[in-house]
Every structure is written in C-alpha cells, then in structure tokens.
C-alpha cells in the first residue's frame, strides 16, 4: 500500500486560528508560498494572507498515510 501522503495545516499569523488544512505528498505543502509569490495561487484567502503577512509555515500533522487515510484525516480536521 502506498503510504506517501501527509496532512498539513497552517494557522493565522495574528489570531492563531487554523486557516488551511491540506493533503499532499512530496513538497506539496511548500508550493503554497511559491504560488502566492508568483501570483498564481488558486486560493484567494491563502494568497492574500501570504501577501499581507509573508510566507506561511505549514506543519505536518500526520504522515505516512495512504490516500484514503489522508483524505479522511483532512476531512476530519476541516470539520
């Protein structure tokens, strides 16, 4: 079974509130800051936060997951 996925989160720089939960593998979590700097981020909330406060630190909350496990974890954290 392919266990290469992880779930990651980011919190607001000022309020500490969670602002993003994502599922990825490889360097997925690091692509957000790059895409925002290139003005190509698909999520306007994340792009605006990065542009206003600088790069976001994304933290892996679970790793070594199958695709199904990662999706389930992501959904649970979003709820």
Image (spheres, helix red, strand yellow):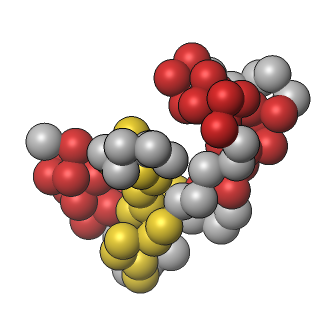
Q: Quadrant of residue 3?
A: bottom left
Q: Quadrant of residue 25?
A: bottom right
Depth order, front residue of 75/69: 75
Q: Is residue 43 above or below residue 28?
A: above
Left or right of residue 44, residue 52 in this image: right
Q: Position of residue 49 (x, y in %)?
A: 58, 31
Q: Is residue 55 above or below residue 50?
A: below
Query: How many discs appear?
Result: 0
Where, quadrant-wise, is the C terminus in this rendering? top left
Q: Is residue 26 above or below residue 23?
A: below
Where, quadrant-wise, is the N terminus in this rendering? bottom left
Q: Position of residue 70 (x, y in %)?
A: 32, 61
Residue 8 in view: yes
At 28% from the left edge and 52% from the top edge, which residue is drawn?
74
Q: Is residue 74 above or below residue 3?
A: above
At 62% from the left edge and 23% from the top edge, which residue is drawn?
48
Q: Quadrant of residue 34?
A: top right
Residue 5 in view: no
Determine the residue located farthest toward the top in the rendered image: 44
Depth order, front residue of 67/49: 49
Left or right of residue 45, residue 47 in this image: right
Determine the residue located farthest toward the front in the rendered image: 14
Q: Position of residue 2 (x, y in %)?
A: 45, 76
At 35% from the left edge and 50% from the top edge, which residue is drawn?
16
Left or right of residue 69, residue 39 in this image: right
At 70% from the left edge and 48% from the top edge, which residue is drawn?
55
Left or right of residue 38, residue 11 in this image: left
Q: Position of residue 7 (x, y in %)?
A: 39, 62
């Amino acid at each position: 079974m392919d266990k290469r996925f992880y779930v990651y989160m980011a919190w607001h720089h000022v309020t500490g509130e969670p602002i993003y939960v994502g599922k990825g593998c490889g360097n997925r979590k690091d692509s957000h800051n790059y895409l925002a700097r290139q003005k190509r981020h698909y999520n306007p909330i994340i792009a605006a936060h990065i542009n206003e406060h600088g790069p976001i630190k994304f933290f892996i909350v679970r790793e070594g997951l199958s695709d199904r496990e990662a999706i389930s974890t992501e959904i649970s954290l979003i709820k």
